[in-house]
Amino acid sequence: MRSEIRQKIISIVIFLGALLILFVYYYRYHLSLRVGYRLLGGIIILVLSLAMLKNRKFLIFSTALFLMLAATQFGAIGNIIETVRWIPYIIFTFIFFSRLFITKELPRKIERFDIFLFIMIVIMFLSAFYSIAPAMTIKRAGTFLLLYISVFWVIYPEIH
């Protein structure tokens, strides 16, 4: 019981320290509005990362929320979500590889659908060589890969 309280206190102190550093940096150097959006995005990243690591249901909810908010017409929210939307995917991928490393087995068996999607993902990455906007193509292929790992290798085995 005491170790849980001590761990919570340490987490709060680390979070408040990081938050304080961000605000001091912001007010000391009088950053522009564009950098202010990134600062606000950094704060949101800190808060959401702590919340997502504590609760898997919140991680799934925030993934869906970020997918919906990525299509917003508000510039400030769009700039923040541009960075923040990658966090749940990366956490899910980290969960998958850590589980794979610890148990040394896949959460479910590989099926024909997985082979088909793997071939599609490889083609998506290869299409960047002849794309008009290769950076955008790689971002979309990477997002699809992270989404595939998140949904089919982390979420699906848990709810199945």
Image: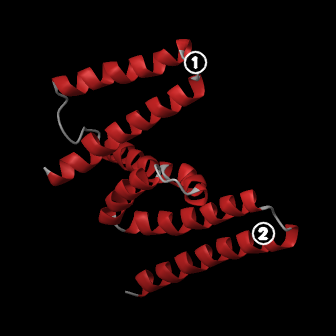
Q: Residue at x 66, y 73 (%)?
A: 19
Residue at left offset 33%, top offset 21% = 120
| Residue 77, image x, y percentages | 55, 59
Let me know if residue 103 appears in the view: no
Q: Please name the residue shown 40% across and 50% down the image.
A: 67
Of 46 and 140, nearer the camera is 140
Quadrant occupied by the N terminus: bottom left
The image position of residue 58, as x and y in percent, is 34, 65
Q: Which residue is mark 2?
A: 26
How many numbered callouts? 2
Q: Would you place residue 119 above or below residue 23 in this image?
A: above
Q: Secondary structure at mark 1?
A: loop
Please name the amino acid that badge 2 sits on: Tyr
Residue holding disc 1: 132
Q: Residue reaching furthest top?
A: 130
Q: Secondary structure at mark 2?
A: helix
